[in-house]
Image (spheres, rainbow, N blue to C red):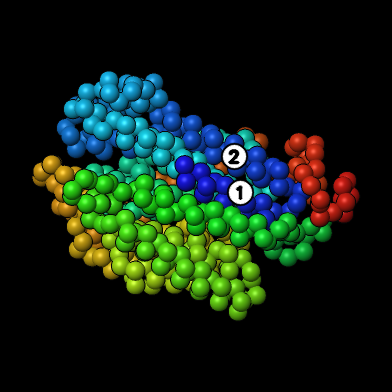
Amino acid sequence: MSVLLVVVGLGFIDMGLVRARNVLVTWAQKLTAAVIAGFGTLLFGYALWQWQFYEALGIPSPLAQALRDWWIGGPASGTISIQLDPKLVPEADIQQVFLVFFVTFSMATAALIHSSVIERIKSAPLYVMSLVVGLVLSPLVGYLCWGPLSPLTNNGVHDFEGVFPLYIFAGTWALVLAWRLGPRRGAFGQDVSGIKPTPSNFGLVAVGVLFIFFAVPFISIGSTWILPDKGVYGISFTQSGIGVILVNIFAAALTGGFVGAIIGWVRREVTWVFLGPIAGIVMGGTLFDIGTPLESMLFGALGPFVALGTAKLVRGMGIEEPKVVPLALGPGIAGAILVGFVKWGTPTGGFPGLEGAYALGHAQISPWWQLIGVVVTMLVSGIPAFILCLVHEKAGGLRVSPEAEITGLDDTVWGVENFGDDRARGVVRS
């Protein structure tokens, strides 16, 4: 349930950064996109993640069987655990709860993608993309590189907090989508209409960040295996501990917040004060289960600098995307690759009781495999994002009309004012 707080946090951040006349549509689009993505994962998506376990256990036709068992009408997802054979569906209760975890994960992914194109994307393309993301693509990245038996994990790719299926995936999609949509009016110089991106309330950004800050430790605990009398392990079955994980998270977040505050003060840009902790958390997302507090502090300190560099690079490319790409894609990639160097040779992957190619700890973390994981994730995200953008551009457009952008989406879409506006209702400058 804490993953839903990420959706809430993103909503408050966007609410604070959009024009007052776009607040209602921003919330409506984000909630709808999240619901649609979650619905897709509930329907079939979770079965794609289960696919890795069916392969490792030697079940015939593993993908087809996983889909039959774990789609929402399947016996594994819809039968109370006491009535399921524990040899066929071990720890069914836990696996059913994890289905909901994946649903909320897809909801957060869609909400994050939406944050990259606020105030200018049409609803229909956003919702189609959200369904494709939740139904297939986000769970597919999870199958490939998030889990103890996933194909890339078994070669040495390491993740913990969902950096690959959430941050890098959403950041790549956001980059492509923001590029195709173009910047908001007035974002790069004076617009003929006189409008420009006008934050409605910077204070709400701080509220959103605190929601996310509160949620992340609980989400991280949900990304562990806890074996009675044996210990705690990360999602890749790297040995860890809940206490160390929590210390590492706070070490990265607080150090990122400290550095972000300095950057904000030096640059006179208050958003870095609020977003610094998030950059630190994302940068350390692949480290928290296997790192030390000092290593997490180092990653947290680097996070805001990587985010700032990414923001400058993206803006230099003429793409207006000041949140998702700088905070998720840049630190996500940098942190994932840096873990490969810092924890080179650390055992990862496999599952207790299995042998051979799936034996516990048979793979080793390396920077090369971390890079391969990054490239694969970006391809799985970027290519479909580009194709869907082209389809919608030909079919009716991605972006709202110039008139709607000037008038405001709350009035255009719903015919209402949400609350006090930045301009008088009905006045349009030319």
The residue at the point 35 percent across, 44 percent down is: 142
**Left-right relation of 19 to 229:** right
Whether residue 233 is visible here, answered yes or no, is yes
- State whether residue 236 is above or below residue 102: below
**Left-right relation of 320 to 418:** left
Q: Quadrant of residue 89?
A: top left
**Kind of residue at badge 1:** Gly
Q: Position of residue 416 (x, y in %)?
A: 80, 39
Q: Which image quadrant: the C terminus?
A: bottom right
Q: Position of residue 209 (x, y in %)?
A: 56, 58
**Within 10 angstroms of label 2, few (less than 14), some, or many (20 or more) residues?**
some
The residue at the point 25 percent across, 52 percent down is: 232
Alpha-carbon distance for marks 2 and 1? 9 Å
Q: Secondary structure at mark 1?
A: helix
Tag 1 residue? 11
Q: Which mark is residue 31?
A: 2
Of the residues under marks 2 and 1, which one precedes in the sequence?
1
**Kind of residue at badge 2:** Leu
Q: Position of residue 349 (x, y in %)?
A: 22, 50
Pointers 2 and 1 in contact (C-beta within 8 Å): yes
Whether residue 386 is visible here, answered yes or no, is no
The residue at the point 30 percent across, 67 percent down is: 292
